[in-house]
Image: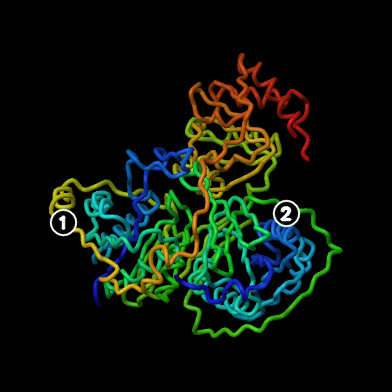
Amino acid sequence: MRELHSVVCVKVVPKPEEIRVDPETRLLLRQGVRSEINPPDMNALEMALALKDRYGGWVTVLSMGPSFFEPDLRVGLAMGADRVILLSDRAFAGADTLATTYTLARGIRRMGDVHLILCGEESSDGATGQVPPGLAEWLGIGQLTLLTALDVDMSRKTARGRREFKGGYEVLEVPLPCVVSVKTAANEPRFMDYQRKAWAFEEARVSVWTAADLDADPELIGFSGSPTTVSGLAEAPTRARKREFLRGTPEEVARVLAIILKENR
Amino acid sequence: MVASLYGIDEANQTIWVYLEHEEGRLAGVSLELLARGRQMADQAGWELAGLLPGHEVAHLSPAAFAQGADRVWLLEHPLLEHFTVEAYTQAAYQAILKGKPSILLCGATPNGRDLTGRLAVRLRSGLNADCTGLRLNQQTGVLVSEVSGFGGGILALIEAPRHRPQMATVRPGVFSAGEADPRRKGELVRLGVELDECLVHTRLIERLSGPGVDLTGTAVLVAGGRGVDGDFELLRELADLLGGEVGATRPPVDEGHVKRERQIGQTGVVCSPEIAICCGISGAFHFVVGIEKAGTVIAINSDPEAAIFDYADYCIVGDVHQIVPALVAALKQEGQAVPAL
């Protein structure tokens, strides 16, 4: 039996609280904005590392984007991942979900033996949550989404996951390999291991794979592989609220509130 | 450029709404999408249809007609009795290639996301997920979807002008279902589905479903954050008096004080109560998205600089543990709770 090989797909995103829109050009102002691994993807990474703790095997961090994402991805190595592969090529630029999932799927194909592909629930910048099922479709394999717990059985070659929903839960099983998406906050991502830091940030080599390495169909990557286009961008209008401050003792405030509650229903 | 399996010229002027159902009822979000779809179809002079996969589910079609559907495409097969992404995707895929809709709308529910994510790839078409607004350009037939990113701080308008069907998912509670008209009639059309058992790899091992709560429909929301210090009993009493429900930001949910189904905000529930009372909540954008559609927002926080006050109509700088009990007492003293609607 070969060892469990998990691939965790992560996205490097600008920190949401630092992003602004230029009111003139309506473009995202990314300058000076720090980046990070998309927080929900950290839950996926933690789930993969926990399986590695339990069963051994190895974990690959896979991402797509420009080469300056590299330092952010090395955090994954310091947490316990074994290698990072960055899919990076100008031809990948402008990819929407369709092109992104195609490109990631090509990268996974190239790796050969993969048992589990883990993703976060959604990204903080796009929040579409459509990458996991799209990936599964390109790869022609099963999917378990929004999991709060996951276990694998390497002898039976199955993955079993728990999915919680309104008022209950379900436990589902699919054959390996499969795609898994992890519910945000399903676990507590571990801190970086200080003993791994020197290796992770200085010694480890990040493999960069280009479109040619992936033997990718040029029609299916980047802009040309993306049906959707952004036709406008704006800072969300915040609904104008009264912002009226009520002052007084708790009892006085409560009396006013009781009236307000009555009037607004 | 990647081409969808059928193009603009082959697409019919019809909007399809995927009809999700559970325990013999259409999902609220499907009704909401029918209501919004009806408005767009009327403006453009298009048809509105429902796509209904399942096993012995024809009886659900009148509810779709009552909500505005001109037609319901019925996909019945024993393998569709329970949702599996493999069978449902294949069934919907076959129907879409037969009916060639210009637009396909679906609820951004767990199953809806699983389904549309796969369908978009199989059809090589564009998918806009988690839309907060939908508009149909009558001249061009292009669906313009509004989506929010970065915790709701930024809005983007997204189109897939050259691909069909134009797909979009919308979360429950974003649109409101119109008044149902039970006298409204439509056409029920049965479509053949070819499914093979070997297609389905997902196995259901165990399932437990209870009543659960649906915060999207509550008229009064009493939400608590870190500042409540885990004392949600206090908020529950207030919510009960007002005939409402308790919700929370993420930290109390993570700490186990409140069930995750009650988490409000971007990764939780987006609700539109008449009144939202925010207790000890700082007002991070992730949370605020969930109460943006509330009629009146009341915020109680001990920090006068808390961001939540920017999103509130009535702001109280004070300790939740003093204000809420005083409010409960005042409501009780009135001799009656605010009458339920």
**Nearer to us in this view, A163 or B137:** B137
State which quarter of the image contains the C terminus of chain A.
top right
- Identify which residue is drawn at 57% across, 51% down: B146
Depth check, front residue: A225 or B184: A225
Image height of A34 relative to A63, above or below: above
- Tell which residue pokes out farthest to the top in this image: A248
Q: Are marks 2 and 1 on the same chain?
A: no
Residue A95: image x %, image y %? 41, 61
Task: Say whether residue A47 is left or right of residue B260.
Answer: left
Residue type of the residue flagged with mark 2: Ala
Report in which chain the residue with disc 2 lies. B
Q: Which residue is mark 1?
A: A204
Dot 2, crowdedness within 10 Å: few (<14), some or many (≥20)?
some
Q: Which residue is at 66% across, 21% downward?
A: A254
Amino acid under label 1? Ala
Decide which of B322, B10 is in the foreground and name it.
B10
> Mark 1: few, some, or many residues within 10 Å (few <14, many ≥20)?
some
State how far apart marks 2 and 1 are (Cα).
Answer: 55 Å
Mark 1 belongs to chain: A
Is B139 drawn above or below residue B224 in the view shown?
Answer: below
Q: Quadrant of residue A143?
A: bottom left
Quadrant that contains the N terminus of chain A: bottom left
- Residue that label 2 marks: B177
Mark carried by residue B34: none
Q: Position of residue B212 (x, y in %)?
A: 61, 53
Q: Is residue A138 above or below residue B325?
A: below
Q: Residue at x 24, y 75 (%)?
A: A2
